[in-house]
Image (cartoon, grey):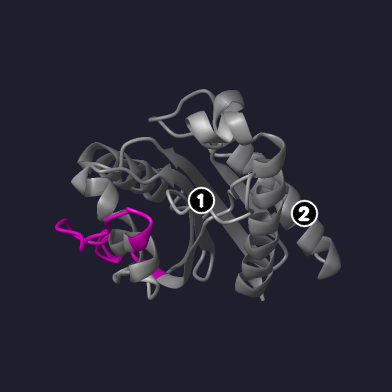
Amino acid sequence: MLKDIVIQALKAVQNDCLSLSKQHYPTVHNRGISNHHLTSLVERRLQKTAQIFGSSIVIEPIDTSKNSHAHNTVYRRITLQYGSVWLFPYSIKTANKVFKSHLFTTLATWRSEFSYAIQPNDCVVLVCDHWLNRINTSQQLIDWWHNRLPDDLSDYTQRGIHLAPSQAPKLDHMMQELQLQPCYKTHTHPLKRQEDGSFVKRYVHLYAIFECK
């Protein structure tokens, strides 16, 4: 049930992001969506979806030694009657090994410091955005996330966007070391061109749910 609620909420977030992108096109075009906005979008949708399922919800900031100011953190523990959702948003400016190392370190610290609270079947949720560019690690990001390139690869190529297989260990491999099992992953392009309504393929949102073992 917990996964069903989270998946439904993330699908609603995708629609919210499309509306947000329309309203704040210049800001999104320059910088993407901030981590605080990503957190707020997921929080709001989880609250509404939990209500539909008749579940209470408690939202708490996640305070770790790597992120010691609880009031400033963008990470959340969102507790429903079915379990906890551990939310980690990332606005990926540079999709390089520094970002991947930071993500792993953050989750490893969370695993260690919240081991007393983490229950089997709890969900870790990653919500990210990124502007695809010509740097190799950016071109490899979608493959790194999904373990495969998108089915509509030719559509990216026609738009001048080169995607390539990841040379680094994939996201699933990294999460397996933390005893996290993938159960849902997707990516979307929420930004539309104002002149013709076509999707801006260079701007991507990435969503994933991992189940705690």
In percent of width and height, residue 72 lies at 57, 25
Q: Is 175 placed left or right of 13 in the picture?
A: left
Quadrant where the C terminus sits is bottom left
In percent of width and height, residue 137 lies at 23, 47
* Structural distance between the alpha carbons of marks 1 and 2: 29 Å
Residue at left offset 53%, top offset 35%: 29
- For badge 1, the amino acid type reads Val
On the image, which quarter does residue 199 sit in? bottom right
In percent of width and height, residue 168 lies at 16, 56
Magenta segment: does it hold 168? yes
Q: Secondary structure at mark 1?
A: loop
Residue at left offset 39%, top offset 66%: 155
Q: Is 171 placed left or right of 123 in the picture?
A: left
Q: Nearer the viewer, residue 139 or 59?
A: 139
The residue wearing badge 2 is 47
Q: Nearer the viewer, residue 25 or 70?
A: 25
Q: Is residue 79 visible?
A: yes
Estimate how packed mark 2 is, as few (under 14), some (14 to 19) or many (20 or more) residues with alpha carbons within 10 Å.
Answer: some
Quadrant where the N terminus sits is bottom right
Magenta-tinted stretch:
158-181
Q: Are marks 1 and 2 in contact (CB under 8 Å)?
A: no
Q: Nearer the viewer, residue 179 or 52?
A: 52
Q: Is 113 placed left or right of 83 in the picture?
A: left
**Residue projecting furthest to the left:** 167
The residue wearing badge 1 is 200
